[in-house]
Image: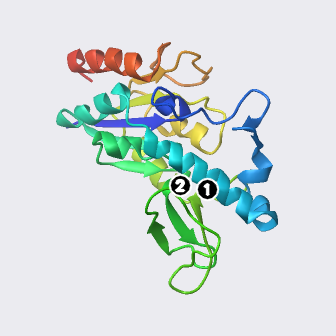
Amino acid sequence: MKNLVVLSGAGMSAESGIPTFRGADGTWENHRIQDVATPEAWAVNPQLVLRFYNERRKRLLEVGPNEGHHILASLEAHFRVHIVTQNVDNLHERAGSSSILHLHGELIKSRSTAYPELVYPIEGWELKWGDLCERGSQLRPHIVWFGEPVPMIEPAIDVMRKADCVIIIGTSMQVYPAAGLIHEAPAACPKYVIDPNAPSISGVANLKVIREGASAGMERVRNILMEADF
């Protein structure tokens, strides 16, 4: 089976009702990024950070995967599908995809502030101030905040270098290091960008842009892949 590598971003989940990452004014659901998604924000006002992610988690539990997610899961019958996602939701998992690498963490998990190797599932939607790990340290969202290292970038690079085909869905290709992953893919492999406002990507061979949303775009790419010999 061929290796199909998918890089998904906020636009992948937009059709499910998950708001895209941030607005044109730089805010994220009416919050400044620096107030809710940085280590400094956690140090200054951890309760605000917890409330912000609790609301996002509550919304996630109210929505489900869209057709784009389901099409990706169905492609596992024909390809080894490896999803590298910038999204912190679990919609790929809920659609049935089995190989998912979360670059920016997972909303449905928490981790210890003092012992980051201690990671726990969150039951329900709420993580509270006073929720502690087994060693007595406060739990924080299991999210990679701005200014923090991206520990899964090296595994993502390894996956991308082994791709026979790449699909990029719903990402602005503006956030690094994730945006650089496309340059790790083999030059000869076909690459598809699915986004109604597809970003400009230079210096990448064998690139085809499909200006559609996640579901319609994935339907088109699925049909192409079923007929392709690559």
Question: Which residue is identified by label 2?
Answer: 105
| Residue 173 visible (yes or no) | yes
Vertical placement of residue 154 versus 32, above or below = below
Pointer 2 or 1: first along the chain: 2
Q: Is residue 148 visible?
A: no
Q: Quadrant of residue 147?
A: bottom right
Image quarter where the N terminus lies is: top left
Tag 1: amino acid: Val
Instruction: From the viewer's perspective, tell me whether residue 98 is left or right of residue 160.
Output: left
Residue 131 percent location from the top left of the image: 57, 74
Give me the C-alpha separation between circle 2 and circle 1. Answer: 6 Å
> As shown in the figure, which amino acid type bears the numbered disc 2?
Gly
**Residue at (30, 43) in percent of width and height:** 97
Mark 2 nearby-residue class (10 Å; few <14, some 14–19, many ≥20): many
Residue annotated with mark 1 = 144
Q: Nearer the viewer, residue 175 or 143?
A: 143
Outermost residue toward the bottom? 135
> Residue 159: where, in percent of width, then height?
40, 47
Q: Secondary structure at mark 2?
A: strand
